[in-house]
Amino acid sequence: PGSTVAIVGPTGAGKTTLVNLLMRFYEVDAGRIVIDGVDIASMSRQALRSRIGMVLQDTWLFDGTIAENIAYGRPQASADQIEQAAKAAYVDRFVHTLPAGYQTRISGDGSNISAGEKQLITIARAFLARPQLLILDEATSSVDTRTELLIQRAMRELRRDRTSFLIAHRLSTIRDADRIVVVQAGRIVEQGDHAELMSQRGAYYEMSQASR
């Protein structure tokens, strides 16, 4: 518990496929995936997914209020619980600038709030759901610097005491990961912590040099 596994590799390397296999959007062709000693193929998809919180680059919000969107997955949550999750994810700051606050309606495509605000809402959703395992996509390419810092801070807080899989886009953010998995062309080519991989002078080392 509390360990962070970072998944790195070029675009199209298979990072998202790994996540899809973990969530059982696809089934594995060979081998198996085990969580706490249990093969995920033996769990129902619903039971598996209830244990996993996801914050992905393509945020999914629905036509409803900000409060309803945060409470997705825990519809019985109280207003106070929703607000606590929002504060933890720094959503509270921008919600209080809106005339209707948490009752502000988000359009189905989320076009009436910014990309960064959408991502913070999905982080608040994960705080409220209290999942056992996290899958985080740290991509923040379409947000301003201040919001990016808030997102990174909220994600760090969310990862505390939880096992997390981090889809990494910048090597600078994953140096402290407990394990780094390097994926190329759909295969895991290296794994270890930052120091181990740098000393091997392989794929990770080359990526690190190229990103300087």
Image: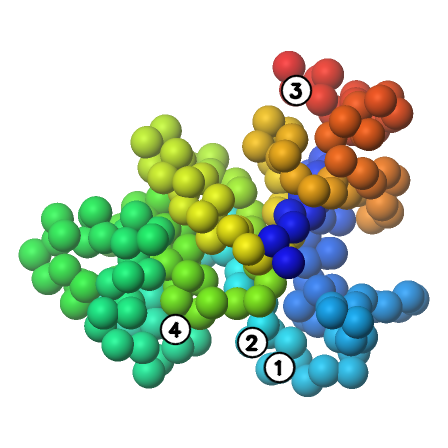
Earlier along the polypeptide chain: callout 3 or callout 2?
Answer: 2
Mark 1, Cα crowd under 10 Å, few <14 / some 14-19 / many 20+, is few
As helix, strand or loop, the secondary structure at mark 2 comes to: helix
Residue drawn at (21%, 48%) of the image: 94
- Where residue 55 appears, as percent x and y from the top left, is 50, 55
- Where residue 74 appears, as percent x and y from the top left, is 39, 77
Earlier along the polypeptide chain: callout 1 or callout 3?
Answer: 1
In the image, what residue type sits under mark 3? Ser
Where does the N terminus fall, quadrant-wise? bottom right
Q: What residue is pinned by disc 3?
A: 211
- Where residue 164 appears, as percent x and y from the top left, is 61, 54
As helix, strand or loop, the secondary structure at mark 3 comes to: loop
In this view, the residue farthest toward the left is: 99
Mark 3, Cα crowd under 10 Å, few <14 / some 14-19 / many 20+, is few
Where does the C terminus fall, quadrant-wise? top right
Q: What residue is pinned by disc 4?
A: 72
Q: Is residue 60 left or right of residue 118?
A: right
Residue 106 is labelled as none
User: Mark 2 near mark 1, Cβ–Cβ under 8 Å?
Assistant: yes
As drawn, 47 above or below 136: below
Q: What residue is pinned by disc 1?
A: 47
